[in-house]
Amino acid sequence: MTLQNQKTRLDHVHVRALLKGMIRIRRFEDKCAEMYTQQKIRGFLHLYDGEEAIAVGIIPLLTAQDRVVGTYREHGHALARGVPMGAVLAEMYGKAQGCSGGRGGSMHLFSRDHQFYGGNAIVGGGLPMAVGLALADRMQKSDAVTSCFFGEGAVAEGEFHESFNLAALWKLPVLFVCENNGYAMGSALELTEAQTDITAKARCYDIESEAVDGMDVVAVEVAARRALKYIAETGKPYFLECKTYRLRAHSMFDAQLYRSKKEIEEWRQKGPILRFQTWLNDSGLLHSDEVSKIAVEVDDEIAAAVAFAETGTDEPEETLTQFVMAPDRPAPPKQSAPGPTIETTYRDAVKAGIIDAMVRDPRVFLMGEDVGHYGGCYAVSKGLLEEFGPDRIRDTPLSESGFTGAGIGAAIAGMRPIIEVMTVNFSLLALDQILNTAATLRHMSNNQFGVPVVIRMATGAGKQLAAQHSHSLEGWYAHIPGLRVLAPATMEDARGMLWTALEDPDPVLIFENVMLYNRKGDIAENAGPVDIDRAVVRREGSDMSLITYGGSLFKTLEAADALAKDGISAEVIDLRSLRPLDMETIAGSVAKTHRALIVDEGWRSGGLSAEIGMRLAEDSFFELDAPLTRVCSEEVPIPYAQHLEQASIPQAHKIIAAAKTLMEAKP
């Protein structure tokens, strides 16, 4: 970051710009409130009235390369950053000309051209992303700063603490700005926090911190200059608590029954615009006629923005699914002729894939709990810390939401992180970041930002780890648009899927079944990338199609071998990709065999097997000579006792029994 002059020069030009910046936000939002009552703006509308000094005092100090992460109350941030007012209002109208193509609305304003990474409807949800953006800048040796705005309500969220810890631990250039307006929606700070001194909380993480009067634009600017100077000199994060007050309701739905009109009026007399304007007039720096000129300039800009939004067009319904995933994806990888083979384990195949990626692309790094010094919970990354160093093999705290969100932010900023979540159940702690950021950002931003992150996790049962460590939740994630979900079972896929996934422009989740890590097999020494779009027929057959994936593949192949001895020819399909599903390969097999049995380690109710079965019922019904059948895990939390654990998940004998019943079924 190239800092501007550290001193605030209160000359005529500068004070006029400060006042105009605040008036511009206030009058724009007054117009937004009017448009809301006319139902031209819908959904939630959170206004910034009373907090303008913060955006105006901080954001203009940032350089073009610096990044801004906002909150759901981010109109002021966007306008202060230079996002055109017409594009902001058109977005709030839901028009195609909006800064997010009408896909984000009031709470999700984005602008790649302005390094504006959007508002976030999830309280505290932008904090881990900001850490990741700063991490990418640090790893790319950029001197950019990421400024992250959030309200005091976010301080109660785990993501606040996880993000502050990571930023301090890794010494990242983040300017954290808490807009403390006293109320988290309708709950006063003293009702929700045992410690109401937020600056004291930040200092607990050894972050340089200060509180400032957020109703005084000059005080905010002076503090921001001091903060940016500190970040430039040390590379470390800085925390500003701007004590302010929102003069309007939490949102336009809010009746404000939790505070008195007298309280609001008392604060209105301390409002940043009135306060600054009065001081300017008393000091002779700016007089009323100049303020009137500013009002005319702003009103003209607002009128032009309204005209722009009013004449905006609706996005055609035909483009509804556009930008759920990137419109341009790499071509399927070319397969090299296999060379000599070596014996390996699934674990080492995954490790080889990580090494391939690290050597091939300097943007790739591995991060997660115990991936470095410990070598990974399942020993996949053992020895990689010594080979690639702590910058690229990055141990994290036990803070799944924090480090997953940081990886997502780093991916947005151009890195290619591999995030290892130790086990699939831990991923639920990061579900907010996966679902609400990684999966949605491309679509909400109208293709301005993508999230090319790879998230690996161990899944499945069989090691007597009991209910909380034996989930098979890949079907849950396959439910989410915007994600690509993979389940490698073979040595080639364990190694090669990672290669292809890292070249994908969208978030890819890879589920590695715990029972496969020790499995041995042969693999070509020159094994490379594999296609991650297509299912594969692992065994040809003519009597029925056995459809499965991941840890159940080899049980299904075992069952198919046993069925062959009884004269039943079973075709085995390895799905490999759970989202998107390769229904073409599945339907082609069923058209040949006319019977389908789905083997899924997930639970039956609402599971992946139900989805595949329904799609076959919709599109291949007349190809079926017997009812659709499935073998799933029993509807119980996975028990600890070995015999009960084995009884609760699909086994070869269950598949054989179901297959024989299917063969006897009549159309």
Image (cartoon, rainbow, N blue to C red):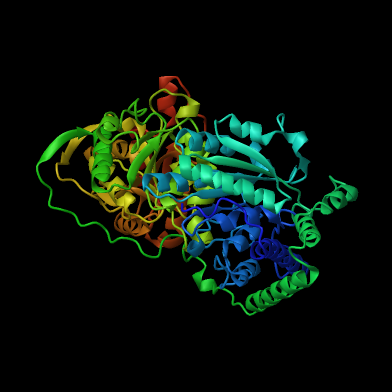
Quadrant (top left, top right, bottom left, bottom right) of the C terminus:
bottom left
Q: At x 38% / y 24%, what residue is drawn? A: 463
Q: Is residue 401 above or below residue 78?
A: above
Q: Could you say which quadrant of the image residue 93 lies in?
A: bottom right
Expressed as whole percent of the image width and height from the top left, the position of residue 641 reads 44, 19
Q: At x 38% / y 55%, what residue is drawn? A: 625
Number of on-image labels: 0
Which is more toward the observer, 255 or 521? 255
Residue lying furthest top: 641
Which is more toward the observer, 394 or 623? 394
Expressed as whole percent of the image width and height from the top left, the position of residue 318 reads 51, 73
Expressed as whole percent of the image width and height from the top left, the position of residue 383 reads 26, 29
Which is more toward the observer, 536 or 187? 187
Expressed as whole percent of the image width and height from the top left, the position of residue 367 reads 39, 37
Q: At x 59% / y 75%, what residue is drawn? A: 314
Which is more toward the observer, 195 or 296? 296
Decide if residue 584 is in sight here: yes
Q: Could you say which quadrant of the image residue 160 lies in?
A: top right
Decide if residue 661 is in sight here: no
Residue lying furthest right: 262
Q: Is residue 647 above or below residue 591?
A: above
Q: Is residue 69 above or below residue 154?
A: below
Q: Is residue 3 above or below residue 156?
A: below
Q: Could you say which quadrant of the image residue 580 lies in?
A: bottom left
Q: Is residue 430 left or right of residue 596?
A: right
